[in-house]
Image (cartoon, helix red, strand yellow):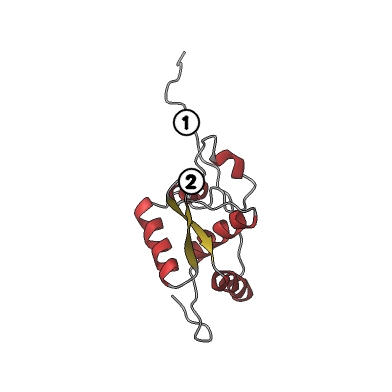
Amino acid sequence: MKDYDNKYSITITQYKIVFTISELNKDKLYPSLKGLRNILIGADDTETRKYKYLDTYACLLSIQKRTLAAQVTNLVRAGVLSYKYDSNTDDMYLMVTTKGKEIIYDYLKHHKVRLVSKDKVVKNEIVKIA
């Protein structure tokens, strides 16, 4: 990771992760790791389809569970993200800290970011051939 002015800096993948969580947090929504991955890969299920309005929807089509978990763990250790506990589901959900919001702002000052949603190619598994 690069270091600007002795501050913690993030990669483009980490930026997309933090930005997605930040956008959800603005609407008082807190994703789990699985929900975050579904948004980033553009999973086509009923729960995830509601978030197609996000700029980062389907922008990391090939991110693996382990890679995402490692990235989130690094961001939590750095204080960019934190966990929020929900007593109803007895589970932990992700939220962006104030340090994370500052890092997003600093990242945009140093980088030109173009978030592109990629279309998934859907192939028919059963076809009729004449």
Q: Which mark is residue 123?
A: 1
Q: Which residue is mark 2?
A: 88
- The quarter of the picture where residue 75 lies is bottom left
Q: Is residue 106 above or below residue 49?
A: below
SS at mark 2 in the image: loop
Crowd tier of the residue under label 1, counting other residues whose Cα lies within 10 Å: few below 14, some 14–19, many 20 or above? few
SS at mark 1 in the image: loop
Dot 1 and dot 2 residues touching (CB under 8 Å): no
Q: Is residue 108 above or below residue 72?
A: below
- Residue 25's spot in the image, x, y percent? 59, 57
Task: Residue at the far left: name it.
Answer: 66
- Residue 79's spot in the image, x, y percent? 47, 72
- The quarter of the picture where residue 20 lies is bottom right
Viewer-proximal residue among 25 and 18:
25
Q: Amino acid at mark 2?
A: Asn
In the rendered structure, which disc, 1 or 2, sits on the residue that comes first in sequence? 2
Task: Residue at the far bottom: name it.
Answer: 5
Task: Residue at the far front: name it.
Answer: 87
Between marks 1 and 2 in the image, the one whose residue lies nearer the viewer = 2
Indicate the quadrant containing the N terminus: top left, top right, bottom left or bottom right: bottom left
- Residue 123's spot in the image, x, y percent? 47, 31
Viewer-proximal residue among 86 and 25:
86
- Residue ID at (61%, 41%): 50
Q: Amino acid at mark 1?
A: Lys
Relative to 53, is 123 on the left or the right?
A: left
- Residue ID at (60%, 45%): 51
